[in-house]
């Protein structure tokens, strides 16, 4: 019987010598290079989520002002189309908030988001990885798809499933935090929750739920699917510059990337995340504008006043009548910037966490 002792040190990104030389000493065939993709089953979940809480909270803190500016640009009333789309409008919105409320005005609703999104991210990431892992195994065993397509298809559907599973938590947090962002005066989360319950009941927390599902489920699928596609295409563009010794290997060989790419692979991941964020934002911004305006429309400017009521159809027709098609791209620049920066930070931090939370195992046959 054959005996193979292998240890995989993912935290350092290197293979154990016994694995690299196994089979060669006995004149056997060279073992196939293993993929650096870390399966969800090999992750220490407790450590991952504890470390992830700090890492993702830090990223949220840095990028949160973009969410405030985006929300205000989507809901502010202006004359003429295209006035709330580009960089100039974004700078104007930032100056307006800072001049009236100071820097803290850029963090309205922050406690609500940073607290409420913690369980939502736990559900999202758990669903994402578990579905992707199972789907990759199923596609590899039952189809003739290439590895690159297996990764793209599994990423697409796992992103959709993860978003669908987490919307039950995301939507109430969005409703409360967005209404805090656009309120005339600062409103504490407890006061806002009581106001929503008083004016609309429990259903008020799920205002625009189906629009959120229609926005974020395909948006998440599009982001993960396009991210995988962009990563493959960018790698193919850079493959000829990798030097000698590749032996004509396909650029889709993930293990070759890990061994020869180094920081180049990290750069490709970052650029791919930016590209995926821009692509997804261009496609999904119109629905996000309608969803955001609808979710904040039933708010009262003062405690005790009757909430203004509207419908999604009224929001669409009113916005189109006042601003035309440009109105549906309100807040495009801050949304695209936030999506790109968040995607880049998330994917790099995510890979870092996975590699530092892997469980080193020994396999004996």
Image (cartoon, rainbow, N blue to C red):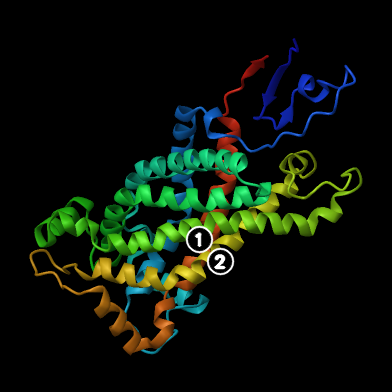
Q: Name the residue under label 1.
A: 339
Q: In this view, does 329 lie to the left or right of 178?
A: right
Q: In which quarter of the image is residue 210?
A: bottom left
Q: How crowded is mark 2: few (under 14 residues within 10 Å), some or many (20 or more)?
A: many
**Vertical arrangement, residue 13 with respect to residue 128, above or below:** above
Q: Is residue 98 left or right of residue 245?
A: left
x, y percentage for residue 186? 24, 61
Q: In this view, does 17 lie to the left or right of 245?
A: left
Give me the C-alpha separation between circle 2 and circle 1. 7 Å
User: In this view, which residue lies farthest toward the top?
Assistant: 1
| CB atoms of marks 2 and 1 within 8 Å | yes
Q: Which mark is residue 199?
A: none
Name the residue: 31% across, 79% down: 316
**Vertical arrangement, residue 165 with respect to residue 24, above or below:** below
Name the residue: 62% across, 41% down: 140
Q: Which mark is residue 278?
A: 2
The quarter of the image holding the N terminus is top right
Is residue 194 in view? yes
């Amino acid at each position: 019987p054959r005996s193979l002792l292998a240890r995989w040190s993912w935290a350092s990104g290197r293979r154990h010598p016994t694995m690299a030389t196994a089979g060669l000493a006995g004149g056997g065939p060279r073992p196939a290079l293993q993929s650096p993709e870390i399966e969800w089953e090999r992750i220490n979940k407790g450590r991952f989520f504890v470390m992830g809480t700090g890492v993702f909270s830090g990223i949220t803190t840095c990028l949160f002002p973009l969410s405030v500016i985006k929300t205000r640009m989507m809901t502010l009333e202006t004359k003429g189309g295209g006035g709330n789309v580009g960089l100039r409008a974004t700078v104007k919105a930032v100056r307006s908030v800072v001049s009236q409320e100071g820097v803290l005005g850029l963090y309205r609703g922050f406690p609500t988001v940073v607290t409420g999104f913690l369980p939502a991210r736990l559900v999202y990431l758990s669903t994402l990885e578990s579905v992707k892992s199972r789907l990759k195994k199923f596609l590899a065993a039952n189809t003739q798809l290439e590895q690159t397509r297996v990764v793209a298809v599994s990423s697409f559907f796992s992103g959709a499933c993860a978003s669908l599973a987490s919307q039950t938590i995301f939507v109430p947090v969005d409703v409360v935090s967005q209404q805090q962002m656009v309120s005339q005066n600062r409103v504490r989360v407890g006061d806002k929750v009581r106001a929503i319950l008083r004016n609309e009941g429990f259903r008020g927390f799920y205002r625009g739920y189906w629009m959120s599902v229609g926005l974020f489920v395909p948006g998440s699928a599009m982001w993960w699917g396009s991210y995988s596609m962009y990563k493959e295409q960018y790698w193919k563009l850079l493959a000829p510059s990798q030097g000698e010794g590749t032996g004509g290997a396909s650029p889709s060989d993930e293990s070759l990337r890990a061994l020869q790419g180094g920081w180049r692979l990290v750069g490709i991941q970052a650029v791919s995340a930016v590209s995926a964020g821009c692509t997804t934002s261009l496609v999904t911004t119109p629905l996000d504008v309608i969803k955001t305006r609808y979710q904040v429309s039933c708010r009262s400017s003062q405690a005790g006043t009757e909430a203004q009521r509207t419908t999604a159809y009224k929001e669409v027709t009113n916005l189109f009548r006042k601003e035309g098609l440009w109105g549906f791209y309100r807040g495009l620049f801050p949304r695209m910037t936030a999506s790109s920066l968040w995607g880049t930070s998330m994917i790099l931090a995510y890979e870092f966490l996975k590699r530092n939370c892997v469980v080193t195992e020994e396999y004996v046959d």
